């Protein structure tokens, strides 16, 4: 059996193990674990867009919002009609519903990704960053003014479906799919398009297709992350998916090293845990966090976990 | 006489008021090795960009194997069978030597991206075939020792060779070489001439060569077309072109038109 598939199955076993033991584990650690997993999904999916394909996107929180709201719409509004008002907690009906909600969230975000991918065919670098930034803000403002989805107050009372199992499984699936794509012959095209679009076209690769695929697949997983996030926090507001959330994900990807999947995963773990470790310094936490970021950027501009000797080309921001 | 493989008919490219390629007629038959020369700014590279679909013709047409190329995107033109190299080497900075050739193998892989996710036997066989094909090409052009090195780390001459190998990996019928000898030393130029002749012979290709180095052009081309200010001013055998007064004038100015050796 090929190795990536084996690793994926191992991760699923790990997820099952954690969920079996979850009753005995400190809920605080489980919460941190869920936060780490969601950030891994976000960072690895953004890495496909910004790292491998070189399309600098500041709209990842927008995709996350689309996924969160679409999934919540399924579980909160459709759920009671589908599985009744009082299903067994953690039972098959609930988990099936949550699976459907995750898929719906991912699919809705993928459609949004498709629409954002199309301007990326004409724009690059900082112009594209601005367009994706604008996209994220449009999503947020639309949700803020759309009363059926709660408006500025957002949605409350979301069922607590997100478990460590779902998060680990989704993170493993994200890493598996992105990893398999970029490591295949097909996936060489993502990096070829990033390095030199004209040469990629002269090699028979369709740059437009690759960019749209990257945006669609990346957005799909961001949507799943948003869905997991919503069913973990149990309340979502448009403000929770603003520009700073996108920046957080971008920071993880840049620190991990653009296009370096393993580095990005480690950076996601590190940057999610860092605020937790900094709790003792209380009010100086954010200052210290920012100082650490600057220090890391200065000391390891090629990405925290990039151990290749050559410095990669600077990202075209 | 066989039908032409590539036919440019009155093809014109304009940039605003500047006519870079002016009503160019050029015909390549299957299996020919033709040179395209001219002073700097004569429109040689623009003609290449026209053929490969980077610029649309303002007027006139380009046809490949009897099929018009108008409106085809560059990657579709590659799929149709025209591959090229670039005057300024355009390799992929983050890919290894092998991956350059594998990327070009995308046109001929049998597995879809979905196969990559399902990891079925189809996928593994397709990947193995693409890699084997790439390794074979690298071995043929003495690049196997650089197989896993980043392409940017290669010596200049090897980078040029890799670009040719990448173009060949798309399995073209027509190969466009844009100044392959630029920046090479005399020894490397001799090797390049041998390489071009070998590619032409062993891959059954038709080749259009843009070049400044007369040694290379005169050494390999069966026929030479000369561009000046976007217009074709002469066409014929290398010998005839060397004697052509219009060509000498275009290169050296009107004072020299009476002959090169009087000064």
Image: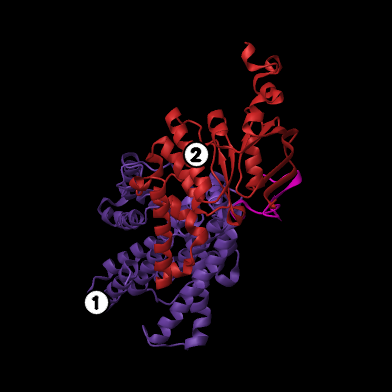
Residue B220 visible in the shown view: yes
Pointer 2 indicates a residue of which chain?
A: B
Give, as a single range, the part of the protein colored magenta. Answer: B55-76
Residue B249 lies, in percent from the top left, at 69, 21
Count of numbered circles in the view: 2
Tell me how the rendering is colored. by chain
Residue B89 lies, in percent from the top left, at 49, 39
Question: Is A197 left or right of B99, judged from the image as shown?
Answer: right
- Label number found at residue A8: none
Q: Does the stretch in magenta take in A42?
A: no
Question: Is A198 left or right of A293, judged from the image as shown?
Answer: right
Please say if A109 is above or below B17: below
Write down the colour of chain A.
Answer: purple
Residue appearing at x 43%, y 51% in the figure = B137
Is mark 1 in CB contact (under 8 Å) with mark 2? no
- Label number found at residue A21: 1
Q: According to the image, label 2 marks what residue? A: B89
Letter of the red chain? B
Residue appearing at x 66%, y 29% in the figure = B241
Pointer 1 indicates a residue of which chain?
A: A
User: Foreground residue, B191 or A185?
Assistant: B191
């Amino acid at each position: 059996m090929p190795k990536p598939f084996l690793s994926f199955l191992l991760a699923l076993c790990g997820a099952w193990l954690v969920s079996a033991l979850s009753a005995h584990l400190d809920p605080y650690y489980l919460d941190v674990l869920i936060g780490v997993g969601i950030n891994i999904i976000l960072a690895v999916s953004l890495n496909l867009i910004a790292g491998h394909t070189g399309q600098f996107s500041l709209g990842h929180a927008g995709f996350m919002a689309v996924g969160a709201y679409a999934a919540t719409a399924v579980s909160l509004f459709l759920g009671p009609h589908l599985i009744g008002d009082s299903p067994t907690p953690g039972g098959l009906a609930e988990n099936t519903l949550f699976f459907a909600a995750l898929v719906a969230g991912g699919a809705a975000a993928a459609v949004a990704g498709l629409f954002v991918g199309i301007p990326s065919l004409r724009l690059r670098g900082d112009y594209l960053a601005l367009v994706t930034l604008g996209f994220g803000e449009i999503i947020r403002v639309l949700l803020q003014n759309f009363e059926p989805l709660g408006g500025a107050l957002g949605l409350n009372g979301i069922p607590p479906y997100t478990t460590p199992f779902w998060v680990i499984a989704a993170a493993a699936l994200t890493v598996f799919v992105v990893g398999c794509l970029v490591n295949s012959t097909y996936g060489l095209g993502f990096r070829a398009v990033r390095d030199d679009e004209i040469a990629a076209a002269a090699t028979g690769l369709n740059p437009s297709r690759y960019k749209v695929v990257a945006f669609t697949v990346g957005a799909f997983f961001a949507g799943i992350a948003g869905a997991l996030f919503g069913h973990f926090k149990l309340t979502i507001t448009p403000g929770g998916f603003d520009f700073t959330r996108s920046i957080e994900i971008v920071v993880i990807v840049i620190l991990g090293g653009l296009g370096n999947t393993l580095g990005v995963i480690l950076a996601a773990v590190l940057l999610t845990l860092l605020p937790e470790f900094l709790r003792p310094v209380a009010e100086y936490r954010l200052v210290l966090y920012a100082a650490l970021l600057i220090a890391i950027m200065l000391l390891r501009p090629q990405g925290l976990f990039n151990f290749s000797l050559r410095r990669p080309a600077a990202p075209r921001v | 006489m066989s039908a032409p493989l590539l036919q440019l008919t009155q093809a014109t490219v304009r940039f605003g008021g500047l006519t870079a390629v002016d009503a160019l007629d050029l015909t390549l038959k299957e299996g020919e090795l033709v040179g395209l020369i001219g002073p700097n700014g004569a429109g040689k590279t623009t003609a290449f960009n026209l053929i490969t679909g980077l610029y649309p013709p303002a007027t006139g047409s380009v046809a490949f194997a009897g099929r018009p190329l108008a409106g085809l995107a560059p990657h579709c033109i590659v799929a149709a069978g025209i591959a090229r190299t670039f005057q300024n080497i355009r390799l992929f900075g983050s890919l290894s030597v092998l991956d350059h050739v594998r990327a070009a193998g995308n046109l001929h892989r049998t597995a879809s991206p979905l196969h990559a996710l399902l990891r079925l036997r189809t996928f593994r066989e397709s990947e193995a075939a693409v890699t084997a094909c790439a390794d074979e090409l690298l071995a043929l052009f003495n690049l196997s020792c650089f197989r896993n090195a980043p392409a940017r780390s290669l010596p200049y001459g090897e980078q040029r060779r890799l670009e040719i190998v990448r173009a060949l990996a798309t399995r073209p019928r027509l190969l466009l070489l844009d100044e392959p000898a630029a920046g090479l030393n005399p020894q490397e130029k001799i090797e390049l001439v041998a390489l071009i002749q070998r590619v032409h012979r062993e891959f059954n290709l038709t080749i259009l060569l843009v070049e400044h180095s007369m040694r290379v052009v005169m050494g390999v081309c069966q026929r030479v077309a000369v561009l000046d200010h976007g217009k074709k001013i002469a066409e014929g055998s290398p010998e005839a072109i060397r004697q052509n007064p219009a060509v000498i004038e275009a290169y050296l100015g009107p004072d020299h038109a009476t002959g090169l050796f009087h000064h």
